[in-house]
Amino acid sequence: MNVNAKRLILYMVGLFCLSLGVSLSIQAGLGVSPVSSLAYAISLTGGLSIGLTTILANVLFIIVQVVLNKRIELQEFAVQFVVSFLFGFFMDATLFLVQLFPTPETMLARGLFLVVSLFVVALGLLGYFTAKLPLMPYDALTYVISEKFRLKFSKAKISSDLINVAVAGAICLIFIQSFGSIGIGTLVAAYFIGKILGWLMPLCQKPLQQWVYEMKKAV
């Protein structure tokens, strides 16, 4: 198997794990991660599937990139749209799978679903970033914000997450008179996913890179 095929497999597995982690957090009912908060808010208020609203939200992120860059990169945005469509499909598929399990009723069970979702999302991010293939629109937008406003990537990430959560919360308050997609789980995800990813990377990224690029271990 060649390097590009392995990168694609790692990328697809990463996206699938990302969607599975988000679906687990939705099932927990304690609030979803900032990156998915807008899509879930639109789903709650519009009655559309989470997969479709994920695609719609990512199209919006592409439009914001165009506005900030003041130019249209057709090839780049076409690739981002394809990735968004794939991720949206994974979202519907994984939510269907997760809903086959009993709905967590107690706070302990809901908390367990949330904790598992954090690790699954972090694993997904690890594979997704290690593959070094096109970014999803939300992540690409964070880089655009970083360059446009001369912010460190970490600060741009915090800014984009806060804006996304604020817009999602406003939509839910206006249309369903509750915070809907925003909850304690949103805050927990915003803080701990990065921490878990930082813990996983030294343990797992090098073995993944060795598998993809067939790097030989130093003797």
Image (cartoon, rainbow, N blue to C red):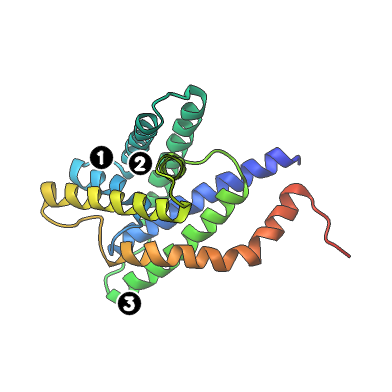
Tell me where residue 55 appears, x and y as whole percent.
Answer: 36, 37
Query: Mark 3 highlights which residue?
Result: 108
Mark 3 burial class by Cα count in 10 Å: few <14, some 14-19, many 20+: few
In terms of secondary structure, where does tag 2 sit? helix
Q: Quadrant of residue 81?
A: top left
Which is more toward the observer, 191 or 68? 68
Quarter containing the N terminus = top right
Tell me where residue 148 appears, x and y as whole percent.
Answer: 42, 39
Which is more toward the observer, 25 or 189? 189
Q: Residue at 30% of width from left, 49% of height from top?
A: 164
In terms of secondary structure, where does tag 3 sit? helix
Q: Do the residues labelled 2 and 1 touch (CB within 8 Å)?
A: no
103 sits left or right of 116 in the view? left
Query: Mark 1 highlights which residue?
Result: 48
In terms of secondary structure, where does tag 1 sit? loop
Tell me where residue 68 appears, x and y as whole percent.
Answer: 37, 33
Which of discs 3 and 2 lies nearer the camera? The answer is 2
Residue furthest to the right in view is 219
Q: Along the polypeptide, which appears first: circle 1 or circle 3?
A: 1
Tell me where residue 94 appears, x and y as whole percent.
Answer: 42, 50
Q: Residue at 31% of width from left, 40% of height from top?
A: 53
Q: How far apart are marks 3 and 2 (CA)?
A: 28 Å
Q: In this view, does 173 lie above or below 25?
A: above
Kind of residue indicated by mark 3: Leu
Q: Residue at 56% of width from left, 69% of height from top?
A: 199
Q: Along the polypeptide, which appears first: circle 2 or circle 1?
A: 1
Query: Mark 2 highlights which residue?
Result: 54
Q: Quadrant of residue 60?
A: top left
Q: Along the polypeptide, which appears first: circle 3 or circle 2?
A: 2
Q: Is residue 55 at all visible to an observer of this figure?
A: yes
Mark 2 burial class by Cα count in 10 Å: few <14, some 14-19, many 20+: many
Q: How far apart are marks 1 and 3 (CA)?
A: 29 Å
